[in-house]
Image (spheres, rainbow, N blue to C red):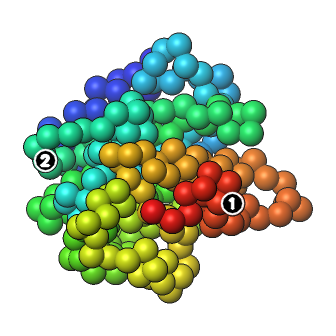
């Protein structure tokens, strides 16, 4: 089965440009994971998830984690996928890596193929090549690192240049658990998000704060876009996030 060949690309950091190049080949575009997915994310129902042959999904989307090196992208992904925290020495992601997770969203099984990108400048050209196939982008900064917050505008410029025009975008202020080292106020993140018109929340890969919510909210938005009827009301991503945080009692970190 041609889709299973794409699984071998999980170590795509060894050959990071292989997947994007496939998307240019019209004869192969339907065979690679993510790169060959239709723009609306729809695929044939009841397909086995490549991350677990016993899991099935109705629809799949490609989500990318982007931001400076060290903001916690890999830790956020591991927390979401495995419910664990990567404690210990920091090791930068080299190139691109991905993991899959299937969520139950409004009676549909939604598979998120989540791509973890390297934040270092030397890998930026590799990251650019993957933008165009992403259905959603989670843009992270570290609330204990002012530079990572200041660089958000540069990341947004890249996203607008290389990503799809209708890509779902969310801004995340990570490491919200480290209150004594915080240098970026939550209000600053909210203000920046409002300026650029994107949803925002703070997260913590260590405590799990809002991690599940961030991915679930994006999955709901993507699912709604793909399945809604013309007369259906638009899904309000930020309103959903605010409502869920309020009900969970985690509006303020």
**The residue tagged with tag 1: helix, strand or loop?**
helix
Which disc is residue 90 wearing? 2
Q: In which quadrant will I find the N terminus?
A: top left
Please determine whether, in this image, residue 198 is positioned above or below residue 83. Answer: below
Does the rendering let one see residue 37? no
**Residue at x 40%, y 33% (from the top left corner):** 83
Circle nearer the viewer, 2 or 1: 1
Please determine whether, in this image, residue 191 is positioned above or below residue 201. Answer: below
Q: Residues within 10 Å of mark 1 (few under 14, many from 20)?
A: few
Give the image location of residue 235, x and y in percent. 73, 61
Q: Residues within 10 Å of mark 2 (few under 14, many from 20)?
A: few
**Residue at x 51%, y 44% (from the top left corner):** 212
Query: Number of numbered discs present?
Result: 2
**Residue at x 64%, y 64% (from the top left corner):** 242
Q: In which quadrant will I find the C terminus?
A: bottom left
Please determine whether, in this image, residue 82 is positioned above or below residue 233. Answer: above
Give the image location of residue 159, x and y in percent. 39, 70
Which disc is residue 149 wearing? none
How far is disc 2 from disc 1 in space, using C-alphas? 34 Å
Please determine whether, in this image, residue 107 is positioned above or below residue 5. Answer: below
Evaluate if marks 2 and 1 touch, with contact meaning CB atoms under 8 Å apart: no
Q: Residue furthest right?
A: 231
Q: Residue furthest top?
A: 54
**Residue at x 76%, y 64% (from the top left corner):** 234
The tag earlier along the polypeptide, 2 or 1, is: 2
Give the image location of residue 126, x and y in percent. 22, 56
Which disc is residue 243 wearing? 1
Give the image location of residue 108, x and y in percent. 71, 34
Location of residue 65 by image quarter: bottom left
**The residue tagged with tag 2: helix, strand or loop?**
loop
Relative side of 110 to 187, left or right: right
């Amino acid at each position: 089965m041609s889709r299973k060949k794409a699984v071998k690309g999980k170590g795509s950091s060894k050959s990071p440009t292989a997947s994007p190049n496939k998307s240019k080949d019209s004869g192969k575009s339907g065979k690679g994971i993510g790169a060959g997915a239709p723009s609306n994310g729809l695929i044939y129902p009841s397909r086995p998830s490549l991350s677990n042959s016993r899991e099935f999904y109705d629809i799949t989307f490609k989500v990318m984690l982007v931001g400076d090196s060290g903001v916690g992208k890999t830790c956020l992904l591991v927390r979401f996928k495995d419910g664990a925290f990567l404690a210990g020495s920091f090791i930068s992601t080299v190139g691109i890596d991905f993991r899959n997770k299937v969520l139950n969203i409004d009676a549909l099984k939604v598979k998120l193929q989540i791509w973890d990108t390297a934040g270092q400048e030397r890998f930026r050209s590799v990251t650019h090549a993957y933008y165009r196939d992403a259905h959603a982008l989670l843009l992270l900064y570290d609330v204990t690192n002012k530079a990572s917050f200041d660089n958000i505008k540069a990341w947004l410029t890249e996203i607008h240049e290389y990503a799809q025009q209708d890509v779902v975008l969310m801004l995340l202020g990570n490491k919200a658990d480290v209150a004594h080292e915080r240098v970026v106020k939550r209000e600053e993140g909210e203000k920046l998000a409002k300026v650029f018109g994107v949803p925002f929340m703070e997260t913590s890969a260590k405590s799990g704060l809002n991690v599940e919510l961030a991915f679930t909210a994006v999955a709901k938005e993507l699912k709604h876009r793909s399945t809604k009827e013309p007369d259906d009301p638009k899904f309000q991503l930020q309103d959903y996030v605010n409502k869920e945080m309020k009900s969970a009692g985690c509006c303020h970190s």
